Every structure is written in structure tokens, then in C-alpha cells.
Amino acid sequence: MPAHDVDLFGNPEPAPKGPRVFSVSEVTKAVRGVIESAFDEVWIEGEVSNFRQQASGHQYFTLKDAAAQISCVLFARGGAWRKTVPLQDGMLVQARGKITVYEARGQYQLNVSLVQAAGEGLLQAKFEALKRKLAAEGLFDAERKRELSQFPRAVGIVTSPTGAALRDMLNVLTRRAPWLRIIVSPARVQGEGAAAEIARALDDLNQLAARGIAPVDVIVLARGGGSIEDLWEFNDESLARAIAESALPVVSAVGHEIDFTIADFVADLRAPTPSAAAELIVPDTAELLRMLDERAAFLQRRVSAAIEHSRVHLAGLLRSALFREPARRIEEATQRVDLADQALSRSLASQLDALRQRLDALGSRVKQHRPDQVLALHRQKISGIAAVLSDRFQQRLRREKDRVTRIADMLRLLSPEQTIARGYTITTGADGQVIRSAADVASGSELHTRLSDGAVISVVGTVTPDPSRAKREKRPRSD
């Protein structure tokens, strides 16, 4: 379609008599509509430059890279600027917002809703993942945290020997505890590889204590504040495990109060700043002296009261009769002891006489009853009873033997073998059942007849029942 058939907004228009002329506003609005419809909210990474903040709270800056730049504005509506990192020129950041056109200047810009340090989102995700992993392993559990010594002899500090954190800690430690021995184990606290150096410095202090070279009671990991990238080495997993495996308690004093690292969660104690760590691990000398003065005054009052009480008690003793007439008191006590001794002797003699008399009476009673004769008589009775029981048992045994013999003879007489020996036979069918009636036999069946000297096997030819027996069986019985 020819370009002159529609306007900038896509509306059809009649063929012009001459070239169509647009106003600046029309072109700018058309460009704004195209840009805003083409982009939703986007993230843009770049370096901050030309940063300025107005009295209204709005912040203006430019994001640039090596080839281009884009103007940005962060409005103070609803305090949105408080949710972002503090901005300054030269920072590498990631900004999220809506691309639009500022019509008054005819330039496109990014209306920013959120700003974070470049790489902060990825680093935060890594931080949270490692935090969950180590928490699941129990490295953050309160049960494994150790108490710090109230009066440490020596403190090990792992930090950069040129950093402000060390100077701040030394100032606080020397002021609060002049007696304290301070051992610095130097290590880089920023940049790639710093975590490994910190772990080695931590191990060196543990070795000093284990070998008895230095009585280190606690170790402090110290570093001043910084961005998440500056503090990232304290989020290293190997360093976290080295802290957990340390034989000595570890205090993490990394960054400012709002900064948290993995080392803070694993350590036995987390201090908001290095200076605060120094105040936490050693007592204040001035406070100790004040407490000692209070305790000394308390002891002095208690001792003075005890001395006064003893003085009054001693004065009372000096006024008592014991100290006025000690010789007479001793003589009276000696006399009481003698009297008690005599009374005890008489009582023992009386008790011994009573025991002798009782023993003599018991001896006489024993002699009168002659236990040897009584025992012989009982033994004679028992022997007689045993002889009677034996005779009765033998008689009963003979009677039972005779009875068993008679029963056995009767059983032998009534046995089938004795019946056969007298000339009788026993006939059974092929199945071994005894034949008791002609009705139990059929023609052609096989019979086994047992004799006294053998057996006969025969086959039935004819079965002839006894008619007289059949009549007797059919005859009705009279009641």
C-alpha cells in the first residue's frame, strides 16, 4: 500500500494534494506508542553515570555500556527508591522498568521500578541454595553452638592485616582487656581465592592451640562492610565447613549489621561488626574493676560484722564462771566422770551376774530332760514304724502279683488261640472280617479258615441258612 494512504497512526487518509507535514508532537506520540507497545517491563544492565537526586526524591541517571546509553528515572512514588541499592556513578547495576518516551525532550527513557547490583540476583539465589543445604545438614543448629570463655587468655583474629576492621578491633580489645594476647592470622578477605586463605588461617590458629604454642580461646573472622560481591567469599561452602570443623569457638564479624553471610550462620556467635565482636568476646576492665570494688566492699562489711560478733561472744565468755573459776570447773567435771565410771562398772557387774544365773538355770533344765535318751527313744520308734511299713508294703505287693497272675491265666484261657487248640476254627472273609452268619457269605466268595496247625482257603459253593434260626429271629418277643 502506498505510504500516503495511511497516517502515522495507521488511519486511512485521502490522497494528499501535496506532501503530508506532521507536527513534532504527532511524531513523538507515534514513536511512544510503538515503543511502549513493543516492550513490557525489561531488565537492563549497565554502568551508572550522571547520577543526581532531586529534592523531590526523584533520581535521574544514565545507564551505559561500551556502545550505547539510555536515560533512566526512578520516581519517589510510594518510597520505591528505599527498596533499591544506593546509587552512585560508576556502579554496575541491573535496572527493571518500562521503556517509554519523554515527549518534552523527544527521547526514550527507562522508568525504573527496581535497581539491584549487577549479579546480585544470581548471587542471592546461590546464597539461599547453600543456606538451605547446610541447614539441612545441621550446621546451623543451636545445639552445636559453643559457649565462649568469659575471660579468654588469647584471641585469634583472621582478617586482612591492613584493613580497618583489624585497627578497630585492636583499639577495643586493648582498651577493654590490656592483659589479652592477640594473634593475627593474616588472610585476604575479598576476591577470588580469599575463602581458601581464610580457611587456612583458621586451621593455623587451631594448630597453634592444639600444639600448646598459644592458648587461643576463640577465633574471630573479621571484615568491614561492602557489597554482596565484596563479602561473597564468606559465603563459600568449604569455608563454612572449615568453621564447623574448628576445634575452637568461632565468632563471625563480617560486614555491617544488615549484612548476613553463610559464615554468620555456621559460626558459634555472630557479631554485627568487628568492633562489636571485640566487645562481645572480652569483658570491660573498667566494669570488672567496678565489680571488684563492689565485691571488696561487700566482703569488708561481712568480715567486719563477723569480727564484731566474735568480739561480743568472746567478751561474754570472759565474763562467764568458766573463765572466773576454771580449776573448780575442771574438778567438778572430773568428779562427774568418776561417778559415771563407778555407776557403769556396777551396772556391768550386775548384768553379768544376771546372765550367769540364767545360764546356770538353763543348764540345769537341759540336764533334767536328758536329750540323748529322748533322741534314742524317738529313733527306736521310727525304726519300728519303718519295719511295719516295709512288711505291709511286701504283703500288698505279693497280693497284687497274685492278682495279675490270675487275670493273665484267664485271658490265656479265653484267647482265640486256646479256642482253636480245643478243636474249634475261626473263619474270615477275604477282607479279614470274621464270618458270624450265613448271611455274611455269598456263593463264590473266598473263605479263610484258621486251624490249630494251619489255615485252609476255600471257595463257597452253596449257602444254606438255618430255617429254625430264621423262625426264632422272626418270632415276636413277649414283653
Image: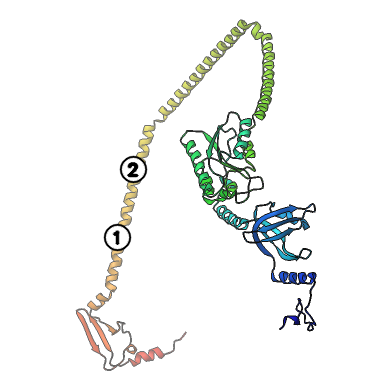
Residue 178 is situated, as x and y percent measured from the top left of the image, at 60, 29
Q: Quadrant of residue 430?
A: bottom left
Q: In the rendered view, would you say 223 is above or below 346?
A: below
In this rendering, position of residue 50 left or right of residue 178: right
Q: In the rendered view, would you say 79 is above or below 103?
A: above
Relative depth, front residue between 118 and 471: 118
Q: Earlier in the sequence, mark 2 or mark 1?
A: 2
Relative depth, front residue between 476 and 375: 375
Mark 1 Cα within 10 Å, few/some/many (few <14, many 20+)? few
Residue 440 is situated, as x and y percent measured from the top left of the image, at 33, 88
Residue bearing the label numbered 2 = 383
In this rendering, position of residue 209 left or right of residue 325: left
In this rendering, position of residue 207 left or right of residue 402: right
Residue bearing the label numbered 1 = 401
Residue 439 is situated, as x and y percent measured from the top left of the image, at 34, 89
In this rendering, position of residue 56 left or right of residue 228: right
Q: In the rendered view, would you say 357 is above or below 34?
A: above
Give the distance between the C-alpha atoms of the residues marked 2 and 1, in whole angstroms: 27 Å
Q: In the rendered view, would you say 203 is above or below 416?
A: above
Residue 216 is situated, as x and y percent measured from the top left of the image, at 53, 35
Residue under the image location 55 percent in, 53 percent down: 134
Q: Which quadrant is the N terminus positioned in?
A: bottom right
Relative depth, front residue between 67 and 204: 67
Q: Which residue type does callout 1 highlight?
A: Lys
Q: Which residue type does callout 2 highlight?
A: Ser
Question: Taking the image as drawn, is residue 402 in sight?
Answer: yes
Mark 2 Cα within 10 Å, few/some/many (few <14, many 20+)? few
